[in-house]
Image (cartoon, rainbow, N blue to C red):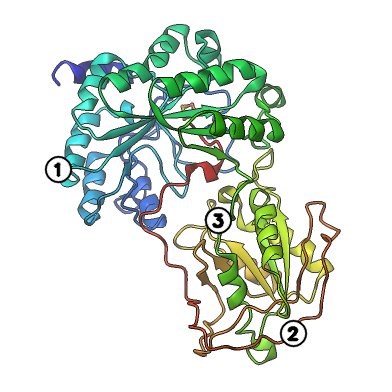
Amino acid sequence: MGQTLPRHQRTTQNRIDAPTLKCGSPSTRGDESVFFQEWLAGGCRKNQLPISAVCNSRCIFCSNNQNPFPIARGLFRDVEDIKHQLSLMGPYQGDIYMSESLPGRIAEGEAFLHPEFFEILKLVRRKYVGNTLCFATNGTLLDEVFVRELSRFRPIRIRLSMHTTRPDLWARIFGRSSRDAEKALGASLLIRKYRMDLEGAMVVLPRICGWDDIETTYETLVTQGAKSMILWRPGYSRLMHHETIRAIECPVEEFLEFSDRMRKVHRVPVAYYPSMHGAPDVDVSRIVSVTLRGNSRNGFGPYRRVLWLTSEAAHDLIAGELHKRAATGGNIHLVAPVRNRTYGGNIIVGGLLMADDFIAAGREVLDVYPDTELVLVPKIPFDRHERDLAGKPAYRIAEELGRPVWVVTPDGSFNPLLEGYFDRNRPVTISMDGMDCVRRSGGGEEAGAQHEPHPCGYSEEAPRHAGAAAMPQEEAIPSGERGSRCR
Ligand code: SF4
């Protein structure tokens, strides 16, 4: 320990993204730090304890420089602030993420750079003795002295960013020296040597690395002990320089083909973002069922035309699920992808959509379908207080569109915002007559019969809950949903 800390502190003095503020600053409300405020806004997750918004690299794709609005960066979290959060966290057995912060108003950074890092680990271990502590890192600080000291706090899982095995390319991608590359590229072996869990994280950059090198890197991480893998298609906003875009662009078809192939070839679980496969991350049936009642315009019958505003990434999955569940009778559901006008670029995930994006997309659809009676938006772009990342509340969507808007959560519960809760204790059967979808092009409709809506039928089934969204407290941190913000 005595050997490690001085070395670690020397390293922090060399960081590129030097803190512009002291630990814990700025306080934007009384004594609450931005870290603490984000923790409150994110629903007081027990699995989230970020400590740094300082980084020592300049990755070619880093999102910290291409955010369309200011985010907090260049600061370490004050130890007293960490104690405050710990003192409010209850019993918990799950993993604790110390590098990631949701909803997403704080820049991602290197936790290992924190000058009081090991003191913080002692505090966390005092309260949470056996929980796995999770870190994301570019690997530049992982020399043997540091890794050995870190391993004393096992169980620990390290998500190591490694986009290439070639030192020259590594240096170009991370904006650091080839010497740094040698150290970072040796980190996975040290992690294994000191018996910590390794997760490989790759941003796929075929125009810089070539597919052969990307595959070699994937295999290297797996061979060196990665128990899971995560892949990102590089994301960029409208603020990214066009030459950089040319360098990092990765066609979505190639990305999905590579990801699918790696999943089949290697036996480790792999998550990739954006993912357009699998089941939609929302209980479509449940949402459909509750749209069949509570409409004040027709005696609390069904909402006769319902508009789902989805992310571009989720559009096809939700539209497909609605088509599968289309039966006889019911109401009409439209599905429209929302283009991210705020970020622009190739950002298609839901987590970065803004209230204004929903308003703009909703207006376009309502021009064509003015008889729409209900609009549904996903929960993921909104924090616990139903505000987007820029702070605009979701109820403004309802006011701007002049329609009821529900914020729907993956489990099928929802927040009706300015509308009342409808509960007549009368269960319903899903009974739908047709679906139609507004396609990406914006104008046409997907093939499929459109029918006039029918009143819903009632049965003796148990009623489905239709209450306000309860923010899940211990869900996995869906960092990928924010795009390739960082690692
Ligand atoms: S992408 Fe992550 S590691 Fe790279 S510069 Fe940004 S914050 Fe640092």
x, y percent for residue 26: 37, 42
Query: Residue 419's spot in the image, x, y percent?
Result: 57, 79
Say if 429 sits above or below 486 in the image.
below
Which part of the image, by quadrant, shows the N terminus? top left
> Distance between the Cα atoms at labels 2 and 3?
28 Å
Mark 3 surroundings within 10 Å by alpha-carbon count, few (fewer than 14), some (14 through 19), many (20 or more)? some
Q: Is residue 233 visible?
A: no
Of the numbered discs in the image, which one, if any, rests on residue 454? 2
Q: Where is mark 1, residue-wise?
A: 126
**Mark sitting earlier along the chain (1/2):** 1
| Residue in the image at 38% along x and 58% along y | 43
List the single residue furthest toward the bottom.
299
Q: How many marks?
A: 3
Q: Is residue 424 left or right of residue 240?
A: left
Q: Secondary structure at mark 2?
A: loop
Q: Percent from the top left, x then y, of residue 435?
A: 75, 68
Rendering quarter of residue 369: bottom right
| Three-letter amino acid code at the position of disc 1 | Arg
Lower sequence index among marks 2 and 3: 3
Q: Which quarter of the figure has residue 328?
A: bottom right
Q: Name the mark nearer the viewer: 1 or 2.
A: 2
Q: Secondary structure at mark 1?
A: helix
Could you classify mark 1 by the number of other residues whose Cα lies within 10 Å: few (under 14), some (14-19), or many (20 or more)? few
Q: Is residue 250 visible?
A: yes
Q: Nearer the viewer, residue 470 or 400?
A: 470
Give the residue type at disc 3.
Answer: Asp
The residue identified by callout 3 is 281
Query: Residue at the location (37% across, 34% down)?
Result: 75
In this view of the protein, which residue sits in the foreground, 474 or 195?
A: 195
